[in-house]
């Protein structure tokens, strides 16, 4: 009887031990080291992107072709979803590849690097331009005068973005920055007459950089010049179509010369370009610094 009882108990013990060992092996195998194996296998051949209408997505699709990355997939989403995926990966020290740009708060929060782009698909440094509808100078001279003077630095923008990412409402972060940089704002509105309640429409894409800049511009227009400003969050295509048709008065979110190149050329002659409001931007593929890759060419299996 004892033999009969012990036999199934021993068998169960062996099975339990094997199950536990397999579980441990499974846990070990499930961990993805940032420095072992081919990067494509590590990240499931996925590049985490943002909204499909963004110029950086078009550039990335082009990069996949130029670098012959046939097995790779660009995952569409939003800038918020991309940032959330990056945050999770960094916290777990796992590999990830995202579409990135500067200025962006994620470069202040994480240790990141751009992958080299030897084929120049993403272009060099970019600028963010202010674009206004045709005729704005005539019927909204105050808005035109301020927008023509509006210019700040990546560091300025980063401060607003970091405040928003830290939990502040965009309008509060903008107001806080304006108070801390009153001398700069004074120069923007110097000699510009008040508008006395006139209405103005600003369009922007839901990038952290554009949320920051458009909110700052809105606050200056309202608190310093007396405008009533409506902000319209749209995709890149409708943003350009709106300012070109006159349905939108202005945008301070036009990335040039690469990101919004197609829209610029499509609507050329139907808007006025007031020039850059921020210089020194960049776009490309971004990875955490702990990943052992340095170039887009490293994504191709040898």
Image (cartoon, rainbow, N blue to C red):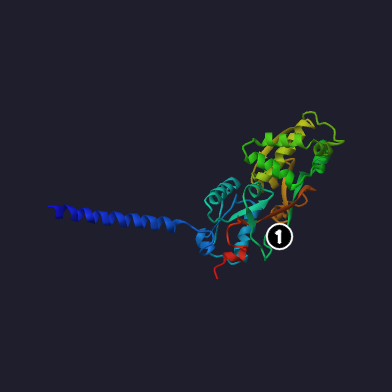
Q: Position of residue 178 (x, y in %)?
A: 75, 36
Q: Position of residue 86 (x, y in %)?
A: 57, 50
| Secondary structure category for the residue under label 1 | loop
Residue depicted at 81% across the width and 31% down the height? 195
* In the rendered image, the vertical position of residue 13 relative to residue 243, given as above or below: below
* In the rendered image, the vertical position of residue 301 relative to residue 205, given as above or below: below
For the C terminus, which image quadrant?
bottom right
Q: Which residue is mark 1?
A: 123
Q: Position of residue 215 (x, y in %)?
A: 70, 38
Q: Residue furthest right?
A: 191
- Which of the 4 image quadrants contains residue 69? bottom right
- Which of the 4 image quadrants contains residue 148? top right
Residue depicted at 65% across the width and 44% down the height? 208
Q: Residue furthest front?
A: 2
Number of numbered discs: 1
Is residue 244 visible to us here? no
86 displayed left or right of 194: left
- Which of the 4 image quadrants contains residue 299? bottom right
Q: Residue furthest bottom?
A: 302
Is residue 249 visible to us here? yes
Q: Position of residue 179 (x, y in %)?
A: 76, 34
Using the image as rendered, state which of residue 111 and residue 241 is in the foreground: 111
Q: Residues within 10 Å of mark 1 (few under 14, many from 20)?
A: some
35 displayed left or right of 163: left
Using the image as rendered, state which of residue 47 and residue 93 is in the foreground: 93
Q: Residue furthest top?
A: 196
């Amino acid at each position: 009887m004892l033999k009969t009882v012990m036999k199934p108990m021993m068998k169960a013990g062996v099975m339990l031990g094997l199950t536990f060992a397999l579980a441990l092996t499974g846990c070990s195998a499930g961990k993805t080291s940032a420095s072992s194996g081919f990067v494509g296998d590590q990240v499931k051949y996925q590049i985490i992107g943002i909204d499909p209408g963004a110029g950086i997505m078009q550039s990335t699709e082009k990069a996949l072709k130029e670098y012959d990355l046939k097995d790779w997939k660009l995952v569409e989403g939003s800038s918020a979803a991309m940032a959330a995926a990056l945050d999770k990966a960094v916290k777990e020290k796992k590999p990830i590849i995202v579409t990135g740009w500067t200025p962006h708060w994620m470069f202040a929060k994480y240790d990141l690097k751009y992958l080299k782009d030897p084929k120049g698909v993403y272009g060099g440094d970019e600028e963010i331009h202010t674009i206004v509808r045709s005729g704005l100078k005539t019927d909204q001279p105050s808005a035109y005068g301020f927008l023509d003077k509006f210019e700040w630095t990546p560091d300025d923008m980063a401060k607003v973005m970091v405040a928003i990412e830290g939990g502040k409402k965009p309008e509060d972060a903008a107001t806080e920055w304006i108070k801390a940089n009153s001398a700069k704002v004074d120069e923007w509105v110097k000699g510009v007459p008040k508008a006395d309640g006139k209405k103005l429409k600003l369009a922007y894409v839901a990038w952290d950089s554009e949320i920051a800049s458009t909110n700052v511009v809105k606050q200056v227009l309202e608190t310093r010049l007396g405008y009533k400003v409506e902000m319209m969050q749209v995709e890149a295509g409708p943003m350009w179509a709106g300012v070109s048709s006159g349905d939108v008065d202005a945008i301070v979110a036009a990335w040039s010369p690469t990101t919004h190149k197609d829209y610029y050329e499509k609507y050329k002659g139907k808007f006025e370009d007031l020039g850059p409001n921020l210089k020194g931007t960049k776009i490309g593929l971004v990875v955490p610094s702990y990943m052992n890759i340095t170039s887009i060419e490293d994504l191709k299996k040898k």
